[in-house]
Image (spheres, coloured by chain):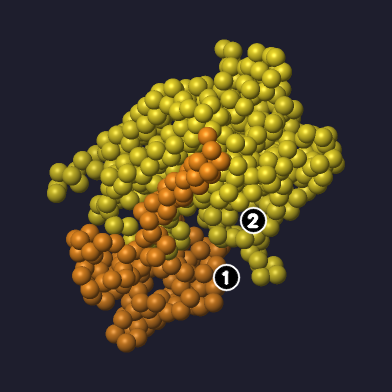
Amino acid sequence: MSIASTSVIQIIPRTRRGVELFLLIIAVGVSVAAYVNIGITVQDKVPASTGYYAAGIGLLALIAHLALRYRAPYADPVLLPCAVLLNGLGVAMIHRIDLGLASIAEANGRTPKAPAAPQQITWTAVGIVLFLVVILLIRDHRRLQALTYTAGLAGLVLLVLPLIPGLGVNLNGARIWIRLAGMSFQPGEFAKVCLVIFFAGYLVVKRDVLTLAGHRFLGLDLPRARDLGPILIAWGVSLGVLVFESDLGSSLLFFGLFLFLLYVSTERAGWLIIGGLLFAAGAFFAYQTFGHVHKRIQDWLDPFSIDGGQVATGLMGQAWGGVLGRGLGQGRPEITLYGQSDMIISSFAEELGLTGLIAIILVYTLIIERGLRTALGCRDIFGKLIATGLAMSFALQIFVIVGGVTGLIPLTGLATPFMALGGTSLVANWAIIALLLRISDQARRPQTPAAPVSDETIAMAVQKQ
Amino acid sequence: MSELTLTLIKLGFLALLWMFVLAVLSVIRSDLFGAKVDSRAAAAVVPQNSRTPKPARPTKKRKGLPGSVTIADGPQAGVGATLVDEPVIIGRGSDCQIRLDDDYSSTRHARLFSSEGQWWVEDLGSTNGTYLDGQRVTRPVPAEIGGSVRIGRTTLNIAK
């Protein structure tokens, strides 16, 4: 098992929960500072709701922290504060754009829409509840391996849910939403988690065949034709998502995730090349066939051809922000279409400038780095693959969304994790962080002589000491 | 609110944001500069003299020379050879001391030989490689009791 033991990393077992608490205090402090800053610049006073906002974010962070102290004492100390900071900043920016939209509506003599920020705080609370459920219920991530095929099936069902007539709704040209009891959900966000578990469980079993069989060609280990089945199925499904749900972003995310995990588990670059070619073929086909993909590419190649297009206004905002930004509350991010959700990165670039944007991207990078670090330190391959998959899902999303907003690649509708307005995405991301923390607790815990498999053996080991 | 105050608030917030990033980086600096930990924790866990912990764990291996190598699993489980002076060649070929029925092994895949008072595992230029305890064998490496050699899909255990 080459991955298992080539990457033995000396981790000194320390719980580091105190460090986490310290970082959490800073994270909550920065979020509250952003909120107060927005109040001061937009309304010229410290907003009355500051107390509620600070108490809300602080309490939620504290509950999550206490759950870790109680049930995952060796978990990574950095993941939770980073997630809290991003979530808090996101809520502050959504609140800031609420104020901007309200003043536009006022100027036009319309009644302003209901503010979105309180809604986002409610969803944060739901996310923390799911975080607690994952931390308290899943005591050992290896149990999830028994659910490999269940998770795969659940992932597929969640993926096709929006296609069911009467349940799925078309929103902004993509059919990735379902409406249930008056609320919209994006089941694809949870499909992501399920599929990572499925891919990991599947590859743990199959990776030997996928690694060993094959022939060398031009210095590359290429797989046998009959082993191409899984990658072709993954490709087909992600193409199906693109065709029937018109969602470029999630299509890219699912195929990218599978490809990364295949590469990580087999250590063979050949898969990347095959996957890259398949992706290029799919992308070309989509460009030729589908109007919405064609439009996205046009919008990317020539953003200013459409008057007031979201990419164009976003780019204008970023340019106006410059290196140091306009300052919170002093830009006009509300002009950009979807400034609270898809384009929230551009809203931040406008008000915090390149300096602030780099800090935000660094925080994301730190989450991804901790995820991969967890994978390196983890002692079982299943856990390694899940941690890698979850970290890569963040990486892919950040790359696709920041690349799209800054005009590097065509803009696709993927949610910016933790920041963008949208309940399902926020809740799912909190579940992902909980899973990563659970695995990192296992990875950083002091090693018992023989890695215990069940609670019984743990109990026996404790009794012996 | 004056222009100056607003600028100061703006810069102050950026500084605060970066302070968080730097605080996180200082927490995980061991990732960036190797596993350097504070001396108290290091003294408690790592032996005093090893500032840079070795990746291998030589202390876990038992002492003494290995005496046999045996296939651990599959239909051929239990097939093996004793290790006395003569080198043992493992592979699919008929001249091998341990003949593997494994499509992923080469005809002459690997050999174990005795030299300088210990046993070594050497890969004989096989297609799929030989792994000792998960590490790919690129040059002769010492074989110790308790080690496991993977050849193709077969795992062999080295025992007393």
- Residue that appears at 28% across and 45% down: A18
- Near mark 2 (Cα within 10 A), the count class, few <14, some 14-19 or many ≥20, is many
- Near mark 1 (Cα within 10 A), the count class, few <14, some 14-19 or many ≥20, is some
- Relative to the observer, which residue lies in front, B126 or A194? A194
Residue A203 in view of the camera: no
Residue A277 is situated, as x and y percent measured from the top left of the image, at: 74, 53
- Based on the displayed image, in which of its 4 quarters is residue A439 positioned? top left
- Residue that appears at 53% across and 43% down: B4
Question: Is residue B76 shown above or below A77?
Answer: below
Q: For chain B, what colour was chosen?
A: orange
Residue B1 in view of the camera: yes
Query: Image check: A273 left or right of B119?
Result: right
Q: Amino acid under label 1?
A: Thr
Q: List the residue tagged with mark 1.
A: B127
Q: For chain A, what colour was chosen?
A: yellow
- Based on the displayed image, in which of its 4 quarters is residue A295 positioned? top right
**Which chain hosts label 1?**
B
Question: Is residue A137 shown above or below A235?
Answer: above
Q: List the residue tagged with mark 2.
A: A271
Q: Amino acid under label 2?
A: Trp
Residue B113 is situated, as x and y percent measured from the top left of the image, at: 38, 81
Helix, strand or loop status at disc 1: loop
